[in-house]
Amino acid sequence: MKNPIVSHVAITNLVTALESAVLDSSVGIAHAALAGDADFRLHITKLLPGAKVKAHRHLHGEELYIISSGGGTLYTGTVNEAGAEDWNEPITVQGGDTFSIAPRMLHQLHNTGTTPLVLIFGCPDSHLSTDREVVADFS
């Protein structure tokens, strides 16, 4: 038996998606969905020079980051037993880099470059609603 032919393919243009991005005030960025479902969806955002995602963590599920263009600094860390944030050494990231953020890992991305940083990220929908804990920014 032959595989059925898919009759519909959704195509999303990255530039058009960025133009329709909606502000997510809890982490301070505007983003737009690209593809996927509630279990794992791709989004796109653009950070202008100096902009940053507020520091936060998720208790469940990984988050995938793909730096499409631009560059910046990634901050990661953990929350210790006393409830304080323990930050690791900052990591420089640039266009073409991809990495995943493990559950419970603190993370913050800051555009420390001179051009916009375009980020594609993937996560469960819960990361954008019920499974997000915003913490004090890296300092």
Image: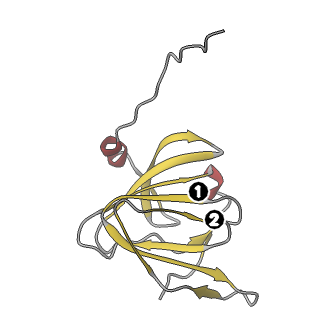
Name the residue rendered at 33%, 68% in the picture: 71
Q: Residues within 10 Å of mark 2 (few under 14, many from 20)?
A: some
Tell me: residue 96, above or below residue 40.
Answer: below
Residue 41: image x %, image y %?
A: 56, 46
Left or right of residue 27, residue 118 in this image: left
Q: Residues within 10 Å of mark 1 (few under 14, many from 20)?
A: few
Q: Which mark is residue 132?
A: 2
Left or right of residue 83, residue 96 in this image: left
Name the residue rendered at 36%, 73% in the picture: 72
Q: Are marks 2 and 1 in contact (CB under 8 Å)?
A: yes
State how far apart marks 2 and 1 are (Cα).
7 Å
Q: Which mark is residue 87?
A: none
Tell me: residue 7, above or below residue 90.
Answer: above
Residue 89: image x %, image y %?
A: 50, 86
Tell me the element at label 1: helix
Q: Which residue is mark 1?
A: 128
Left or right of residue 117, residue 83 in this image: right
In the picture, the quarter occupied by the N terminus is top right
Name the residue rendered at 67%, 61% in the picture: 131
Residue 91: image x %, image y %?
A: 44, 78
Tell me the element at label 2: loop
Name the residue rendered at 49%, 73% in the picture: 108
Residue type (three-letter) at the residue carrying disc 2: Arg
Residue type (three-letter) at the residue carrying disc 1: Leu
Task: Please tell me in which quadrant of the rendered image residue 69 appears.
Answer: bottom left
